[in-house]
Amino acid sequence: MSVLNLKPANACTYDLVALGEIMLRLDPGEGRIRTARWFRVWEGGGEYNVARGLRRCFGLRTAVCTAFVDNEVGRLLEDFVLQGGVSTQFILWRPFDGVGRAARNGLNFTERGFGVRAALGVSDRGHSAASQLRPGDFDWDDIFGRIGVRWFHTGGIFAGLSESTAALTLEAVRKAREHGVVVSYDLNYRPSLWKAVGGQARAREVNREIARYVDVMLGNEEDFTACLGFEVEGADAELLHLDVTAFRRMIERVVREYPNFKAVATTLRAAKTATRNDWGAIAWVNGRFYQSRPYPDLEILDRVGGGDSFASGFIYGLMTSDDPQRAVEYGAAHGALAMTTPGDTSMASLAEVEKLVAGGSARVQR
């Protein structure tokens, strides 16, 4: 897309590289964490999920920058990444001290929720190897320059892990800018990450500084308020009634303050119940607004990762076409499909996304 000035694909090894933490997700299925006797295991991480979606659904070349402790859990995480087709070239391995005092691999216990019982995430990620990453751990000049990357993606989850990851994120986006690599950033506000280190005020301080180096800014209904301080006029506390006009006015204020933004996109989710959501998205690209088709009363199996799948579909649309409307439709459709299957990551195919974008139904395929 001309507005993003992407590097030629044949000049780069990777279409997209993501920086973030990958955790082992333990899922009790239809049950509760507190009473579980078994867990199904997945991998997941806000930034990684985008790279995986772009690889598995959309066929792009992606890699992830992260760190694992070198034990059986770390190798299980590596196996998940390999199954997802994402390159492990930039994964850093830390020694295991036998206990996890120095570093460990993060865990994420997640309930899907059902009906009036909301989805629930309980992270166990303290002292994780990824949270200890710091400036200088990755050779960005080599990654963005010699190896070659067209697009770099990271987000507020990784930046919120620690002071050192916030500094590393800032280092990475600055280096990407130097090398002419398009930068996308998903605000992904998580109150649990920030509450012990300064809360929302600290989240805004960190994210506002990073935002000045971002080309494509992503978020959900509340992220722009929590992370950048832009209120959505008239929004109710539970975000059950989403006024698209109010979101447009908010985005207009955002792009005036951050003229470096070439595109801004936000998902629109009204969670009526854990398993029935109104879903959609809007985007601002190069001075114009675009809105996806609405998905009223969308049936949800597992909402976790829906926003990440929107991001990967939106990025794919921007990378492969000059049509922002198509990009926002790809994002909304991919997010909707990802929430019909368990786990953080998408199990959708490009054909399924394109069928949904074209208005296809759920009639049985035989």
Image (tube, rainbow, N blue to C red):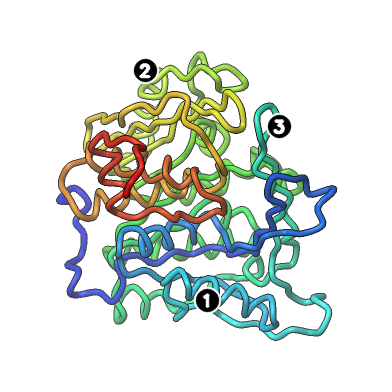
Residue 136's disc is 1
Secondary structure of the residue carrying numbered label 2: helix
Q: CA distance from mark 1 to mark 3?
A: 43 Å
User: What residue is rendered at 66% in x and 70% in y?
Assistant: 132
Q: Earlier in the sequence, mark 2 or mark 3?
A: 3
Q: Nearer the viewer, mark 1 or mark 3?
A: 3
Secondary structure of the residue carrying numbered label 3: loop
Secondary structure of the residue carrying numbered label 1: loop
Q: Amino acid at mark 2?
A: Thr
For disc 3, the marked residue is 117
User: What residue is rendered at 34% in x and 49% in y?
Assistant: 313
Q: Nearer the viewer, mark 2 or mark 3?
A: 3
For disc 2, the marked residue is 245
**Residue farthest toward the top in the current orientation of the protein:** 234
Residue 194 visible (yes or no): no
Q: Amino acid at mark 3?
A: Arg
Q: Position of residue 260 (x, y in %)?
A: 31, 45
Cβ atoms at labels 2 and 3 below 8 Å apart: no
Q: Position of residue 340 (x, y in %)?
A: 49, 44
Q: Position of residue 58 (x, y in %)?
A: 31, 59
